[in-house]
Image (spheres, rainbow, N blue to C red):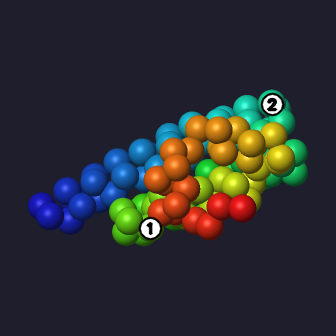
Amino acid sequence: KDLIRFRAASAKQEENFTRLAERYSVYFQKGCDEGYFRSDLDCTRTSSILIDLLHTTDSGDKTFLLFTLLRGLCTDKGREAIEEITPENVKKESYIYN
């Protein structure tokens, strides 16, 4: 019975992962189209990496990793947008801000 439940739970988790990856991929594509993310971004692969990264890291490291990843994918326009919406305390805690 446990094996059957495990397979069902595993299948549900994979379904959720796929749905979330598709949603993030659409988000990244929209950002590319609007000039916030680099035009050569592989949106599908990047969304999968983001989900894996967020799933496998401790909660304290997620903010740092998320901002680092997103800033690395951004154009100048995207970095300016992140700069505008990022609270000062997050800037100080998450990464060295230049």
Disc number placed over residue 61 in the picture, else none: 1
- Observer-nearest of 93 and 79: 93
SS under mark 2: loop
Disc number placed over residue 70 in the picture, else none: none
Q: Position of residue 48 (x, y in %)?
A: 59, 56
Q: Quadrant of the N terminus?
A: bottom left
Q: Position of residue 34 (x, y in %)?
A: 80, 30
SS under mark 1: helix
Residue carrying label 2: 34
- Observer-nearest of 36 and 28: 36
Q: Gap between marks 1 and 2, in whole Å?
A: 29 Å
Query: Which residue in the rendered view is the most extreme toward the right?
Result: 40
The residue at 14%/64% (across/down) is 2
Q: Quadrant of the C terminus?
A: bottom right
Neighbours of disc 2 within 10 Å: few (<14), some (14-19), many (20+): few
Kind of residue sitting beneath label 2: Glu
Answer with mark 1 or mark 2, whichever residue precedes in sequence: 2
Residue 25 can be seen, yes or no: no
